[in-house]
C-alpha cells in the first residue's frame, strides 16, 4: 500500500527534488564553462562523445522519459533530436551512429543550450505539479535522470581529457585545481573474515536496478591491500619488461597490447629517466605515490599476476568496505586527479580517487529481473563481456556513490579514471 503524503509533506518532497534537479543540471553546464566553442564538437575516438553531445543527450533523457509521457500537450523542441541524441535505446527508436557524433556541426552549441533551457522550463512545471496522477513514477524517473546526468558529468571530464590529450598542444582544462599530496604510505594487508555475507542494495533511497536484490554470498577469508597500487609500483612493473612478457597476460590482453602497442598506462609518456602524464591541468610529472590511473582490467590482472597476488572479487570488495563511511577524494575536492593515501593500519581510498577493477564479470545478481522497455535497457542489456569496478573516482560526485554501486566497462578500456588494489587468499 502506498503512503499518502500530507500537502505540507508533498511540498517538502517537491522542493527537495526541484533543488536537486536545478543543482545537477547547473553542475553539468559549470563543467563545460572552461571550454572554448571549438572544444564542444570534437570526437577523438568512437568511445569518446563530444561535450556538445553530452549536454544534449542529458536533456533528451528528461524530454523522452518524462516530458513526452507525462507533460500534457508537450511539443518537441526539434523533431530530429529524438534520433540525434538517443544513445542506445532500441525500444525508443533509431539513433545516430556513435562513432559519427563528432561529424555534426549542427545543432550549434548555442542551440543545444537553448534545448536544455527549454527542457528545464517544462521539467520545473512538471515537478511542481504535486497532484499529477503519475507523481510517483515522475519522481522515480527524475531521480534516475539526475543520476544518469551525474554519470555523464564523469564522462564529460573523461572525454574532455581524452580530447585535450590528443591535441599536441596539450591544452589545460583548468589551471586552478588543488594540488594532490605525494606522501609515501607503506601498503598493509588487511585480513577480512569470510563466511556467509549479504551484499546488494536494499532500502528506500535511490539505487540502480543492477545493485539488487540484496542477497547472500559466501566468501572465504581473504586479505586486501590497504591502498591501491601506486604509480611508482606500476613503474617497477614496466621496468621489469612486463609489457613484453606474454606469460603475465590473458590471451585477449596479449593480443590487445600487441595490436595497440601498449607500453604503459594511457596518457603516460617517458622522457629520459622521468615519466609524465596528461591531467586535466595539462602535462605533469608523474608523482610516484599517487594511485596508478587510466589502467585497463587487462593491465591490472597482469600486474596482479606479476606481483603474485590477485584482484578482489566485487563481493570481497563490498564486504571489506561495508562499514566504511563514503569519504574520499571526490570531485568536490577540486583535484580532479588521484591523491596519495593518508595513513596505514586500515583500509584507505576505497571511495574516490580511482574506480577499482575487480575480477568479477558484470552479471545479474540472483533474483534480478530486467524491466521491459527503455528503463530495462539502462543496465540490464550490458550484462555481457564487461568487468565490474567499484568505489567511484576523483571525478565522481560524492552523493552519487555508495557501497553497492556497480560500474562496468569492457576489460580493454582505460580512458576512465580506473586503477586497482591487490587481494590475496588467507
Image (spheres, grey):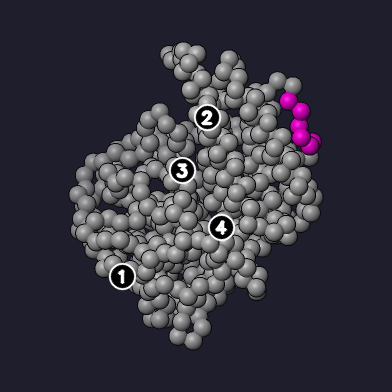
Q: Is residue 81 above or below residue 300?
A: above
Disc 4 and disc 1 in contact, CB within 8 angstroms: no
Question: In terms of sequence position, does the residue under pointer 4 or pointer 3 come before the other?
Answer: 4
Seen at 54% across and 51% down, the residue is 154
User: Label 1, label 3: how many angstroms apart (C-alpha)?
Assistant: 29 Å
Disc 2 and disc 3 in contact, CB within 8 angstroms: no
The crowding category of the residue bearing disc 1, from other C-alpha atoms within 10 Å (few below 14, some 14 to 19, many at least 20), is some
Question: In terms of sequence position, does the residue under pointer 4 or pointer 1 come before the other?
Answer: 4
User: Label 2, label 4: how many angstroms apart (C-alpha)?
Assistant: 27 Å
The residue singled out by tag 4 in the image is: 158
Q: Position of residue 83 (x, y in %)?
A: 74, 41
User: Label 4, label 3: how many angstroms apart (C-alpha)?
Assistant: 17 Å
Nearer to us of marks 4 and 1 is 1
Question: In terms of sequence position, does the residue under pointer 2 or pointer 4 come before the other?
Answer: 2
Q: Which element is circle 2 on?
A: helix
Q: Which element is circle 4 on?
A: helix
2 falls in the magenta region:
no
Is 55 left or right of 76, judged from the image as shown?
Answer: left
User: Label 4, label 1: how many angstroms apart (C-alpha)?
Assistant: 27 Å
User: Label 1, label 2: how many angstroms apart (C-alpha)?
Assistant: 43 Å
Seen at 31% across and 45% down, the residue is 325
Question: In terms of sequence position, does the residue under pointer 1 or pointer 3 come before the other?
Answer: 1
The residue singled out by tag 3 in the image is: 400
76 falls in the magenta region:
yes
The residue singled out by tag 2 in the image is: 17
Magenta highlight: main SS: loop
Amino acid at each position: 500500500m502506498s503512503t499518502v503524503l500530507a500537502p505540507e509533506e508533498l511540498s517538502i518532497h517537491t522542493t527537495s527534488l526541484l533543488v536537486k534537479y536545478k543543482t545537477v543540471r547547473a553542475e553539468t553546464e559549470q563543467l563545460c564553462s572552461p571550454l572554448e566553442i571549438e572544444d564542444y564538437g570534437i570526437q577523438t575516438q568512437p568511445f569518446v562523445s563530444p561535450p556538445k553531445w553530452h549536454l544534449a543527450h542529458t536533456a533528451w533523457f528528461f524530454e523522452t522519459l518524462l516530458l513526452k509521457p507525462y507533460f500534457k500537450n508537450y511539443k518537441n523542441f526539434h523533431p530530429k533530436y529524438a534520433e540525434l541524441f538517443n544513445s542506445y535505446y532500441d525500444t525508443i527508436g533509431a539513433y545516430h551512429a556513435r562513432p559519427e557524433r563528432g561529424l555534426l556541426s549542427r545543432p550549434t552549441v548555442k542551440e543545444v543550450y537553448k534545448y536544455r533551457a527549454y527542457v528545464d522550463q517544462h521539467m520545473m512545471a512538471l515537478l511542481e505539479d504535486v497532484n499529477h496522477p503519475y507523481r510517483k513514477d515522475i519522481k522515480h524517473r527524475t531521480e534516475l535522470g539526475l543520476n544518469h546526468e551525474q554519470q555523464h558529468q564523469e564522462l564529460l571530464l573523461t572525454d574532455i581529457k581524452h580530447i585535450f590529450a590528443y591535441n599536441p598542444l596539450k591544452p589545460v582544462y583548468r589551471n586552478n585545481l588543488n594540488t594532490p599530496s605525494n606522501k609515501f604510505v607503506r601498503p598493509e594487508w588487511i585480513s577480512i573474515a569470510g563466511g556467509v555475507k549479504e551484499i546488494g542494495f536494499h532500502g528506500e533511497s535511490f539505487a540502480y536496478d543492477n545493485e539488487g536484490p540484496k542477497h547472500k554470498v559466501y566468501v572465504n577469508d581473504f586479505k586486501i591491500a590497504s591502498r591501491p597500487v601506486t604509480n611508482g609500483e606500476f613503474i617497477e612493473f614496466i621496468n621489469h619488461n612486463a609489457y613484453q612478457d606474454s606469460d603475465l597476460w590473458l590471451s585477449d590482453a596479449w593480443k590487445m597490447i600487441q595490436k595497440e602497442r601498449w607500453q604503459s598506462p594511457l596518457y603516460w609518456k617517458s622522457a629520459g629517466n622521468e615519466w609524465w602524464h596528461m591531467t586535466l591541468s595539462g602535462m605533469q610529472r608523474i608523482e610516484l605515490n599517487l594511485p596508478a590511473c587510466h589502467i585497463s582490467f587487462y593491465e591490472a590482472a597482469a600486474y596482479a599476476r606479476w606481483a603474485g597476488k590477485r584482484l578482489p572479487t566485487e563481493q570481497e570488495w563490498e564486504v571489506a568496505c561495508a562499514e566504511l563511511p563514503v569519504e574520499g577524494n571526490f570531485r568536490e575536492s577540486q583535484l580532479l586527479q588521484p591523491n596519495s593515501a593518508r595513513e596505514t593500519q586500515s583500509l584507505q581510498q576505497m571511495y574516490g580517487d580511482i574506480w577499482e577493477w575487480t575480477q568479477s564479470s558484470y552479471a545479474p545478481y540472483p533474483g534480478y529481473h530486467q524491466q521491459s522497455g527503455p528503463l530495462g535497457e539502462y543496465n540490464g542489456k550490458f550484462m555481457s563481456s564487461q568487468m565490474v569496478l567499484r568505489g567511484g573516482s576523483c571525478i565522481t560526485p560524492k552523493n552519487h556513490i555508495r557501497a553497492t554501486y556497480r560500474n562496468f566497462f569492457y576489460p580493454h578500456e582505460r580512458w576512465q579514471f580506473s586503477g586497482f588494489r591487490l587481494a590475496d587468499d588467507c
